[in-house]
Image (cartoon, rainbow, N blue to C red):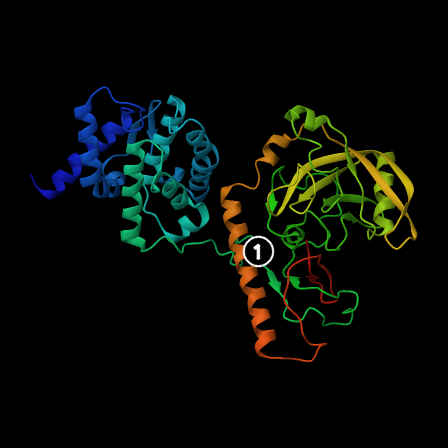
Amino acid sequence: MSTIEEVIASSRRLLFLLSDGFLFSPFSSSPRLFQEARLLCRSKAQVAIECLHNLLTKIDTFGRIELSMAQNTKDNLLCHSRYIRDTLAPVVVRENGKLNEQQANSLRTIFAAISSIKMTVELLQYSRIDKAINLIAAEGSIWPVEATLLSDALLSAWERSLGSLKNIRADLWGPGGRLEGIKKLTDAGHGADAGERRGSAWSVEDVKDRYRAYNYGHLGFNVGDWWIKPAAAFRDGIIDASHNSISADAEAAYAIRMGGHDEESEGFYQNKKIDEVERTTIKYTPSVHEPKHGIYRLMETIRSGKAVRVLRSWKLKSSLAPKAGLRYDGLYRVIGHGVRLATNFDGTDRWEYTFHLSRVIQPPQDSMEKALAVPLSDQMDDWKDYQRTKADQELGGLVNMLLLPKSKSEIRIPRDSGYFSPNPSGEASGTEN
């Protein structure tokens, strides 16, 4: 038998085992078949996988499934990656490596789909499917043995064609990246309004519609949409460019970005079912620095009945806060407000405003259950990459300060915190939380 014939035979045998459900069964009734599968995966699977797309176009899993290139888009690969990392991985840990029949079938379908395309760096950067497969193949993995062998074969095939996969990361600032158009300023104190923008560090360029946020409703955004930084949320138009928590113009309030102690304290939502969370009235307390015009516009929504968009930051001291970044949690209506005389740390008096918000039930919107699953694994990948980049920049600033002494007024360590605000050029710049 020629080498090509051997490859074809191995490919067909591998697909037979896949379609028969053998490779992902928790156990096998035939030790001989089990050993045969292990030897097959080790010796032939790497070559066989590369030939699957050309050899066979169909596999029997819940009927005949077409492995067309149209199905294997970047978005499909991203969905596969999220399913493995965010859905199956917790099950594998909880059930000590066991998958039920439906989960095993889904995994077979995913392997068949991703094995049928020629992988590229661009696809890996976008989908993180290599991280998902590596999770299965990792040393000490408790995933089904046959799944780990097939994962090893996939990773080896990709490394032969693309080189090392370790340093493949998404381009956060490139076209379509989460931070596209957002640049760090080297001297955030420049400009006519430098005093007003003291501490600014970010610039948002090429904003298509600076006033999109001054409209009611979802504006095309979905519950669970996520951003690394508020500047990216402004770029996309869900909040305005001000450093305020309330996005408001002279006529109305449209969105609230919660952070710090804006919401109820940690533990308020613990041990509550998701439907209880949905119907629980939340208490929003703007910070002492929140401008009065935004507060007054938010009061007026009680009379108008208009709902406002609510976004939660990772810095929010609440059980509903995301682990990282900024998340859109849907529409809320202001159903009441209060004001009391409070005392500042310095002993002076101030007015403290509170608002009671209720999440919109009708018309229906996506559940908070969807939002609370965010950030997903690939979003956390980008968050960690961004944090590493930020740490490197801050370390570089510290080194420069130590190696190149300046006058006291010139010493400035780059940092990323606070807010961002508009500048005269039509862009938005500043620090943000």
- Of helix, strand and loop, which one carries label 1? loop
Q: Is residue 185 visible?
A: yes
Q: Which residue type carries mark 1?
A: Leu
Give how far across and how far down residue 285 sits, in percent: 80, 42
Quadrant of the rendering where the N terminus is positioned: top left
Q: Nearer the viewer, residue 29 or 156?
A: 29
Taking depth in this image into account, of 21 and 118 the one nearest to the observer is 21
Task: Identify the residue under disc 1.
Answer: 179
Left or right of residue 219: residue 61:
left
Q: Residue furthest top?
A: 29
Q: Quadrant of residue 107?
A: top left
Residue under the image location 37 percent in, 34 percent down? 110
The structure residue drawn at horizontal position 69% and vertical position 28%, both measured from the top left corner, is 278
Picture coordinates of residue 306, whole percent (x, y): 80, 36
Does the rendering let one see residue 362? no
Establish if 20 lies above or below 319.
Answer: above
Residue at (35%, 42%) from the top-left corner? 138
Left or right of 240 in this view: 123 = left
Answer left or right for 349 relative to 126: right
Q: Label 1 neighbourhood size at 10 Å, few (<14), some (14-19), many (20+)?
A: many
